[in-house]
Image (tube, rainbow, N blue to C red):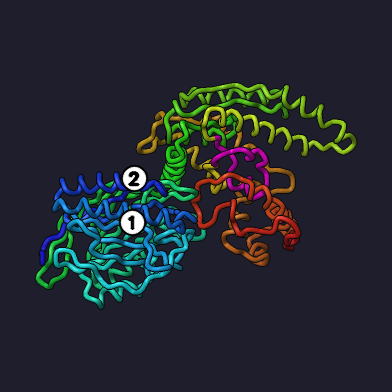
Amino acid sequence: MTDRLSIALAQINPAAGDLAANADRIRAARAEAAARGADLVVCPAGAVSGLPLLDLAAFPAFLDAVEATVQSLADDTADGGPALLVGAPWRDGPRRHNAALLLVDGKVAAVRFQAVTDIGEIGVPGDDHFDSGPMPGPVNLRGVRIGLLIGGDLATGDVAETLAESGAELLVGMLASPFAAGPFATSRADERMQAAVARVVECGLPLVAVNLVGGQEERVFDGGSFALATGGRLVAHAPLFAEHLLLTRWERGADDGWDSCEAETIVPTEGTEALYTALVLGLHDTVTKSGAPGVVVGLTGGLDSALIAAMAVDALGPERVLAVRAPLPAGEAGTLADSLDDAAEIVELLGCRLDNVALAPVLKAADSLLAPALAGRESAGAADRLHARLRAATLAALAERMGALLLSTADRTDRLLGLAPEEAGCGYAPLADVPKTAVLDLARWRNANQPVGSRGPAGRVVPERVLARRLEAETPAGLPPVETLDDLLAGLLDGGWSFAELAGRGYAADMVASVWRLVGRGEGSRRRAPPGTRISRRTAASLRRFPISGGFIDLV
């Protein structure tokens, strides 16, 4: 039995399915922890495999490879260095579990399964459909009984209470909890902390928790690993949105309880800064984990495309971003000239490359080709949508020729209302879950700040004229101003407000009805839209999925 224990929390960024690279990350963290005197290195849930795995978690060949990788990591621990706690999918007969494995002295010394698998996303995304395991007992390391809370086990008191009753002296949380923020719920980082404090207070045991970090699929895992002493006192905190090794040291007291004697605390980012950083991390990892050499952004001179270009440069560096001016001939000549000038200024501020594509011949040829078929039935709206799709197809062909990822510039508001036909052919949509009002806040924040780890320039990156144009922009006919529109959409789809509640907040019946019809009719375009970073509980692409045809259109 020992009276001192050094626990390193390895907040790492694995890639889903890339077992060799993930094992290398774990080995690097263990080597650093060994140099700093750690006895135990704790990795997040899914650290070996990455998460989410989706249907990959059901393939026997993949699970065989996971087991071989875990055994290889276990072999490493025969060197007498720190023990390892790693997360991985694990089979138990016909069942498949989200597991924590204790690796020490060259072997897999203990296996524990997540007991609670139906508690939202506070611990592990629900896409992988893991089976629930039995209520666990503690594992033993150097005579210290450690209780493991895997994923959603942290969210309920039952597992922690069972561990405490079974003799656990210290609780360890292994999480893969993604970033989320929104007007109708606390941030997920706050949820994790509140749940952890509740477990500590209920059980009277200290707790350390390590969380995954990095972008994968539509999620951004935000890190923020931490340690709590008895009573819920915060004694250590790792940064958000960055890989980090957080070392905590614990000593046994006269009452046999454990208390922290050394750790570091890094204040987490919040608000608009946290949102911007999450979007940049999600974009960076989407590109790098897919192996793409860079991205293509279609610059329109508008705010959405300007912000996308800035985030891409911050995430990847200017040399990996190609901005393309491919203007549509619609609109007044002065407005078009201003948009072209603004696009050029954006590129100059960011330092990325700029290409120009003349669409007029393509659009003229398409109009001529379809003129006989559309004679007498032509509409300006249909022509505008056709031109937008042809522009998107041209940009998609350019990106494909380069092997790059084409970024959509559509935001959540446009997606919900079905106003983003140009998304066809795009590979990723960084603003897919960002309301139009938040786009303005993000651009203003970025003009005044340079994010930590940014590969882009300091200072202003979005021209003031672009911001001013957004403020003066009008919403489509029949719709309220943007601020009102976003509030209505949030209440209707995120808050679950009834018509009576909407009316009580001052929304006219005809306004609610027109917005609802657009949302219902936009389902088809949302299903065809590219994936994008999730920042709320639901994405615009899968938000309360509606029937494409025959839906409930008349809300009022």
Q: Based on the displayed image, in which of its 4 quarters is residue 379 positioned?
A: top right
Is residue 5 toward the left or the right of residue 426 in the image?
left
Choose top left, top right, bottom left or bottom right for residue 473: top right
Q: Amino acid at mark 2?
A: Ala
Report the Cα–Cα distance between label 1 and label 2: 12 Å
Disc 2: CA contacts within 10 A as few (<14), some (14-19) or many (>=20): some
Q: Is residue 468 visible?
A: yes
Please tell me whether residue 421 belongs to the stretch shown in magenta: yes
Question: Which of the labelled discs sits on residue 20, or is there none?
Answer: 2
Q: Position of residue 62 (x, y in %)?
A: 41, 53
- The residue drawn where x is 63% and y is 50% is 527
Is residue 356 left or right of 509 when viewed as pictured?
A: left
Residue sticking out furthest to the bottom: 165
Number of other residues with Cα within 10 Å of mark 1, as a class: few under 14, some 14 to 19, many 20 or more: some
Helix, strand or loop at disc 1? helix
Identify the residue position indicated by label 1 in the image. 67
Looking at the image, which residue is at 51% across and 25% down?
347
Q: Is residue 544 highlighted in magenta?
A: no
Residue 90 or 432: which is nearer the viewer? 90
For discs 1 and 2, the disc positioned in front in the rendered view? 1
Residue occupying the point 87% across, 38% down: 377
Span colored in magenta = 406-428
- Amino acid type, callout 1: Glu
